[in-house]
Amino acid sequence: MTAKPSQLPAKRIVLAEDDESMRGFLERALERAGYEVLSFANGKDALERIEQEPFALLLTDIVMPLMDGIELARRASEIDPQLKIMFITGFAAVTLNNGVETPKDARVLSKPFHLKDLVREIDNLLETAKS
C-alpha cells in the first residue's frame, strides 16, 4: 500500500532518531508545539510507516542503524514528493558533502540546537509548503 501525497497532514511529523533520549525529547517538544509526531528508532521502521500514511514532514537524524537518514529521505521523497525533509545531525557538514544526493529543498539543523530554533525552522518549512 502506498501513501497518498501529503495534502491533509499539515501538522503530522514522522521522526527518525536512533538516540532514545533525544527522540523522546524531540517528540515531547514538538507535541507541545502543536504537532502530531510518530517517532522511530531507525530509518527502516520510519519508511514502513511513510509507505502507509501521509505526513507533512520527515525529521531525521543522518547516522542511524538499518537505514541512514539520507537513504530514508531519498526513498520517502519517491513515495511522497510533497513531503518536506529536515535533517538533524551532528555530522551534517561531513555527511552531506560526500557527494551523496539528498532530496531537493531538504533542510539541515546541526546538533546541538535549541528547541525553539527547531520549532521555528519546522514552522517556517511547513508554512512555505502551504503557500
Image (cartoon, rainbow, N blue to C red):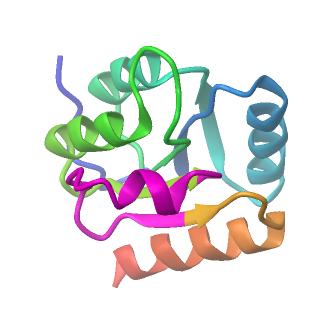
Q: Quadrant of the C terminus?
A: bottom left
The residue nearer to you, when weighing 57 against 94, is 94
- Residue 101 in magenta stretch: yes
Instruction: Name which residue lies at 41% across and 81% down.
Output: 128
Image position, residue 92 (x, y; %): 52, 58
Magenta part, dominant SS = loop
Q: Residue at x 77, y 24 (%)?
A: 20
For residue 80, which quarter of the picture? Answer: top left
Vertical position of residue 73 compared to residue 71: above or below: below
Quarter that holds the N terminus = top left
82 above or below 68? below
Which region is colored magenta? 89-108
User: Which quadrant of the view contains residue 33?
Assistant: bottom right
**Disc count in the image?**
0
Residue 26 shows up from this direction: yes
Name above or below for residue 89 compared with residue 68.
below
x and y percent of residue 42 in the render?
A: 52, 21
Q: Is residue 62 left or right of residue 51?
A: right
Name the residue nearer the viewer: 47 or 69: 69
